[in-house]
Image: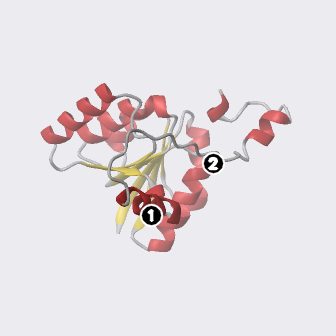
Amino acid sequence: MLKLGIIGTNIITDQMLDAAKTSGHYELTAVYSRTEERAKEFGEPYGATQFFDNLERFFDEGDFDVVYIASPNSTHYLQVRLAIENDKFIILEKPALVNPEEFSQIESLLQAHPKARLVEAARHIHTGLFHEGQKQLAKMDHVQGANFTVRKYSSRYDKVLAGEKPYPNIFT
């Protein structure tokens, strides 16, 4: 059983924790959020016993092997860096990092910490549409370029339209 820590207390984290429970391979132990109250509110129903509002303490004192990061994209670099420096396995929501320089630095850091592992949670590679695209590409002699547009209505947008405060993090 792998001990799981999480960063990010939103809908996608609920989905990840449901999948983790179904797999039978993970036990949620530690939760980081901007407030300890929110960490407890989110984590207690899943059986977590450690709650943090300080990222350094989360990595220094948290009892977990794997960290799932589902925070705003702009915070990924710092969180991933700390996870690697603490030799954690990392499941990181997409997009992993916001620019090639960050990716290059993380790549170098991973080489310096061979116990750490990083996986981007890119589930699209398991969808039928992705596989159909692969088949079509295989038929082409060459590709000059491509544009892909994916849209999905966020249920959290209803809260914005209703004027609920505070706005969901994704819209701030």
Left/right placement of residue 65 relative to residue 164 reads left
> Residue flagged by tag 2: what amino acid is it?
Glu
Instruction: Pinpoint residue 136: horizontal percent, then vertical percent.
Output: 43, 59
Q: Residue at x 38, y 60 (%)?
A: 139
Against 30, residue 47 (above or below) is: below
Callout 2: helix, strand or loop? helix
Callout 1: helix, strand or loop? helix
Q: Quadrant of the N terminus?
A: bottom left
Q: Is there any visible trace of residue 64 in the rendered image?
A: no
Q: Is there any visible trace of residue 41 in the rendered image?
A: yes
The mark nearer the N terminus, 1 or 2, is 2
Quadrant of residue 80 in the image? top left
Closer to the camera in the image, 54 or 85: 85
Q: Which mark is residue 41?
A: 2
Residue identified by numbered label 1: 131
Closer to the camera in the image, 12 or 36: 12
> Residue flagged by tag 1: what amino acid is it?
His
User: Few, some or many C-alpha atoms within 10 Å of disc 1 (few <14, some 14-19, many ≥20)?
Assistant: few
Left/right placement of residue 69 relative to residue 10 reads left
Q: Quadrant of the C terminus?
A: top right
Instruction: Pinpoint residue 122: horizontal percent, then vertical percent.
Output: 43, 52
Left/right placement of residue 155 relative to residue 82 reads right
Instruction: Pinpoint residue 75: horizontal percent, then vertical percent.
Output: 45, 30
1 or 2: mark nearer the eye = 1
Against 42, residue 136 (above or below) is: below
Q: Residue furthest front?
A: 141
User: Few, some or many C-alpha atoms within 10 Å of disc 2 (few <14, some 14-19, many ≥20)?
Assistant: some
Instruction: Pinpoint residue 22: horizontal percent, then vertical percent.
Output: 50, 73
Q: Pointer 1 and pointer 2: residues touching (CB < 8 Å)? A: no
